Image (cartoon, helix red, strand yellow):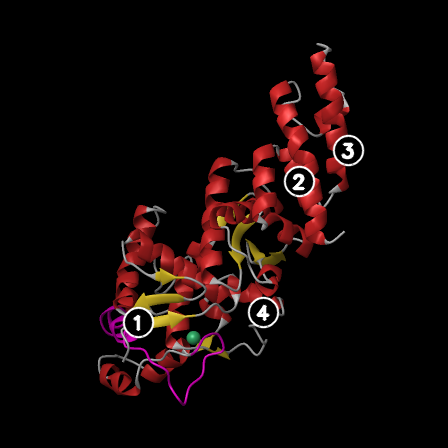
Amino acid sequence: MEDKIILYPSNWLYNAGVVGFLKVLQYNGINFEIDGKLIIDRFAIKESYKGIFRYHEDVLNERFSIWGKNKRYPNYIQSSQKEFFENYYVKALQRIERNKHKTCSWCEGYFIPQILIDDIKSKFKRNFSSFLEQREKFQGIHFAGLGAAITEVPNSFWNLNFSTPICHLCSYLIIFHHLAFIKTPEGEIFINAPDFYLIWDLNNFAEKILAKSKEYEVRKILGSSLLQWAIKRRTLLGAWTMMNIEVIVKKGSIIDYFDLPPNITKILLDYDIANLIEEINEEKIFDLILAGKFSELEKANYFVLKTILKLKKNDEISKNDPITKYFTKYNDLQYLRRVSQILPKLYGKILEKIGR
Ligand SMILES: [Zn+2]
């Protein structure tokens, strides 16, 4: 048995579970290695169970529960199974391994070895096989709200037969998924991608951005997160990875998906372009780019130059001046001079990037 467990990105629900799990590990000071994939120590599983309660109490000020009637995962286990779950099942989970006879629709398939199952069975009070069956199937009823939502949305991982086979690890990770979602005015969001490091980063950036600008819409949160990523990580992403960045928006029991057009994603993830946008530091310009109105940048620059002339002559800039459509700091000559250098460069680089 290897010490470490390696996880690869899969569908968004699984990925959100993993991110929630990582948040709990991070909060409790448990290390993990993350790049495209994720490497965790086995003991992290048991620690995460204690950790998830602590996290809810300390960070969310919430009493977390997974047994019986509860807010997030009603009847995930029964109240009478709580002791068994904590003292035997979660412990056994640390020894998960691949199983030739069982498959998981979401991951490589990590199951508690049969010997261990036979061992802990005697500690279980009632119908053990039905308890175990519930750990091996993804059933809407276990995942409050979300279950209902998923059955209504045909999805790559949900094949509508209402009981997708999953493994013991996946059915455990799912109770962390709500922690990955970030509150926004449009609903709770999770940024998904086919790379764990990218997912982890983008969601962390999004959280920080939202802490500053609470009223940002989803489009802007995603756009700004991509921009931050390009500036801070300076790494080239493959086309396939770029095309598969999406936001999951959860509003009550409705699940929505949002993504940016491929061209916009490509532009925002370009290191040079991202830096120029950051240097301009003007939301109105950022909005134009997010909306794909690139040629407006040329127009904007025309008005910048005009405004510079006016300011030099000490003319007053009226509130209806076209420049106000593009810039907030339209009275700042130094700033406009700087911007007049950046805008043409930015426009050129964008055209180059999208091949026009
Ligand atoms: Zn699995």
Residue at mark 1: 4
In the image, residue 42 above or below residue 335:
below
Q: Return the disc, 3 or 1, that comes first in the chain's sequence.
A: 1
Q: Return the disc, 2 or 4, that comes first in the chain's sequence.
A: 4
Three-letter amino acid code at the position of disc 1? Lys
Instruction: Return the mark for residue 151.
Output: 4
Q: Nearer the viewer, mark 2 or mark 4?
A: 2
Between 253 and 99, the one nearer to me in the picture: 99
In the image, residue 153 above or below residue 287:
below
Say which element carries label 1.
strand
Label 4 CB sits under 8 Å from any ligand 1 atom:
no
Where in the figure is residue 19, as x and y percent of width and height?
42, 59
Label 1 CB sits under 8 Å from any ligand 1 atom:
no
Between 273 and 325, the one nearer to me in the picture: 273
Residue at mark 2: 346
Q: Which residues are magenta?
A: 83-108
Q: Is residue 116 found left or right of 288 in the rendered image?
A: left
Between 288 and 74, the one nearer to me in the picture: 288
Three-letter amino acid code at the position of disc 3? Lys
Between 68 and 166, the one nearer to me in the picture: 166
Q: Return the disc, 3 or 2, that comes first in the chain's sequence.
A: 3
Give neighbour class at mark 3: few <14, some 14-19, many 20+ (Cα, 10 Å): some
Q: Return the disc, 3 or 4, that comes first in the chain's sequence.
A: 4
Q: Is residue 281 visible?
A: no
